[in-house]
Amino acid sequence: MAEMLIITGLETFYGKIQALRGVDLHINKGEIVTLIGANGAGKSTLLMSICGRVKARSGAIVLEGLDITKAQTHEIIQMGVSQSPEGRRIFPRMTVMENLQLGATTNQMAYFDEDVAKVFDLFPRLNERKNQRGGTLSGGEQQMLAIGRALMSRPKLLLMDEPSLGIAPILVRQIFKAIGRISKEEHVTIFLVEQNAFHALKLADRGYVMVNGAISMTGTGSELLARPEVRAAYLEGGAH
Amino acid sequence: MEYFIQQLINGVTLGSIYGLIAIGYTMVYGIIGMINFAHGDIFMISAFIALIGLLILFGAGISWLPFLLLAVLILSMFLTAAWGWVVERIAYRPLRGSFRLAPLISAIGMSLFLQNFVQIAQGARIKPLPPVVSGGFILMDSGDFTVNLSYLQIVIVVLTLVLMTGFSLLISKTALGRQQRACEQDRTMAALVGINVDRTISLTFVIGAALASVAGLMFLLYYGVIDFFIGFLAGIKAFTAAVLGGIGSLPGAMLGGLLIGLIETFWSAYFTIEYKDVAAFSILVLVLIFRPTGLLGQPEIEKV
């Protein structure tokens, strides 16, 4: 199977503090791969590194055969990577529509009407709120908008950072269902970072576990779900 | 009454000029959180470009006024915009990501550099320009006082209105304006949707400088004299206007410019002209005490 993304020996620092300690992982085309790990393990740093916001000290990030380790963020997005970031980062003083229009920056809104229809089909709630300002949406609605905005660029690789964080359980289920649909219907490769390990591993083809800035375990979703150390650290009491 | 109306006309004219400069301050602050202290000097340079342009065209024997003004306006907008771009490129961009005060200090240095550069290149003496646009209407005549509305005042106010309308539409309706606002609200996220943030910041400086250049030409035509130091006071006033209206807010900059122009003019007319600057800045202090975000400014939104 062809690889969408290969990361080898990635190390990054914030000042003198090392955030990533030699991360190796790969994502195949069409897969849903999840990365689980505790707070502060370096999961968000990894996503920001892929997007060129955090520069690597050493190691390489290769997207479809092209080295993007030193590329600028907007160039990487232009190449087909998209992120629904931690904390959602909706533009607060812009409407839902404007947020979606910004999501379509890289294709100059060439397929805007068609893509907006798809997003509204995925999240009908956004249609009801389309002229409301982003800052006035609820957490769950903002998360839907963040995912919708990330889809507007027609990405090959969609990075999602904790889409279930701080969201009502009923909406969490809806969002995970949507992620499954995006993978199946749009054939988007998905890299999903989650603390909600149960939902994430059930949905994913494969998973990685990150501890202290390095990958400590890998396997298929069901393999990892069955591992006692994964259950003890990330699932017990956390499943819902 | 006649006297009052005359001051109102004068105040709105002056306020237009301040408003156009103030937009440059407020846009740059909005997008990179920095006060561009060299912006007043960009305005000053634009007045010199306009002066030189007018003299060259006069020398070439061109005297048809609409062409003359339009040609100089366009020339000055382009050249001044280029200055704005270069200043951002060499003085601010290399310092992005540095500590907060660094670009501010660099801006003050740039301001001094531009003043000294023009002082040396053009001389320190006041440069006069014979009246280019003369004449006007007499609106009222009560015998002992006439209310004049000059053609130049009409041109200034109408051009300002047109530019501000066009500019507001640019910001609120176009893709460029949307990207500009996105960079203002969350620069990281703007990059993550694929916006070239550096280019957008450059464009902000270019647009701000182009608007200031219109103010520079108006100032030159209205007062008829310029020197290398006009950018300082006009810049401080326009900055005050931006803060008064609420820094970061575009309608605020326009409103603030208008108010500063009116306050200054009315104070000069009814009290003492020596204290007109004190009056303008006192109003600023009062507004900031009771409304720290300025008249139309919005407090930072807390993230949910």
Image (spheres, rainbow, N blue to C red):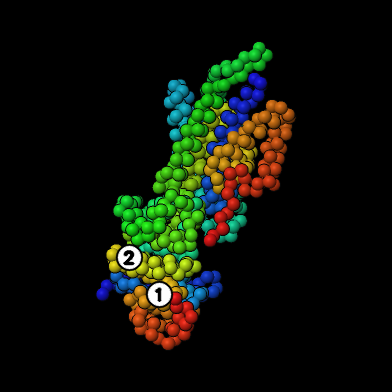
Height in image: A156 above or below A197? Answer: above
Q: Which mark is residue A59?
A: none
Q: Is residue A206 above or below residue B5?
A: below
**Residue B137 position within the rendered picture, expressed as x and y whole percent measured from the top left:** 55, 18
Q: Quadrant of the N terminus of chain B?
A: top right
Crowd tier of the residue under label 2, counting other residues whose Cα lies within 10 Å: few below 14, some 14–19, many 20 or above: many
Residue type, label 2? Ile
Residue A16 on image: x %, y %: 55, 73
Q: Position of residue B206 (x, y in %)?
A: 47, 44
| Label located before the other in sequence (2 or 1) | 2
- The residue wearing badge 1 is A199
Question: Is residue B66 in sight in this rendering?
Answer: yes
Residue B117 falls left or right of residue A100: right
In this picture, residue A36 sits left or right of residue A1: right
**Residue found at the far bottom of this picture:** A228
Name the spot of residue A76 as percent of width and height, x first. 38, 62
